[in-house]
Amino acid sequence: MAFSKDLRRLKIRKRIRGTVSGTEQRPRLSVFRSNKEIYAQIIDDVTGKTISAASSRDKDIVSISGNKEEKANLVGKSLAEKAMKAGVETVSFDRGGYLYHGRVKSLAEGAREGGLKF
């Protein structure tokens, strides 16, 4: 049976979600990466609510020139800033089935620079 990259990623994502879940004290930082953009949100899985979100499509990030990895770093910093305003300091990182490399790693480092603790 041949598996596509998407199926492989979804299997890994399911495995990760089996162990990583967000609570009110330690919400989940979820990452989604498309070919062009990157999106991240902080989720409280107990209540099912998104606390804060940021993406490379936000007006302040779109206006800045740079490659996708640099923009991912800015998304991480922006998300950390929004999370701090909402009173969130520690999060569980959910890489969403993607390898911790490239844009996903850059986003995580940006969030750490912004003050979030993983």
Image: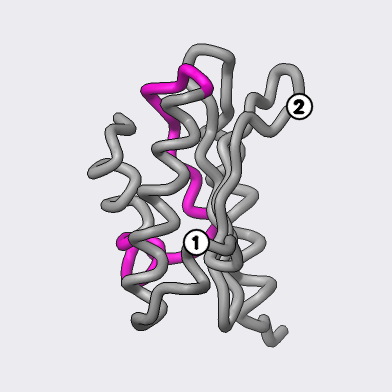
How many marks overall? 2
Q: Residue at x 33, y 33 (%)?
A: 116
Q: Which residue was labeled with disc 2?
A: 48
- Specify the farthest residue to the bottom: 2
> Quick check: is 77 in the magenta stretch?
no
| Amino acid type shown at disc 2 | Gly
Check the picture and name the quadrant holding the C terminus. Answer: top left
Q: Residue 37, image x and y in percent?
A: 56, 73
Q: Which residue was labeled with disc 1?
A: 60
Q: Quadrant of residue 48?
A: top right
Magenta region = 86-106
User: Against 29, is 39 above or below?
Assistant: below
Side of 9 relative to 82 (left or right)? right
Check the picture and name the quadrant holding the N terminus. Answer: bottom right
- Specify the farthest residue to the left: 113
| Amino acid type shown at disc 1 | Asp
Q: Residue 89, image x and y in percent?
A: 37, 22
Side of 30 relative to 84 (left or right)? right
Q: Residue at x 53, y 26 (%)?
A: 27
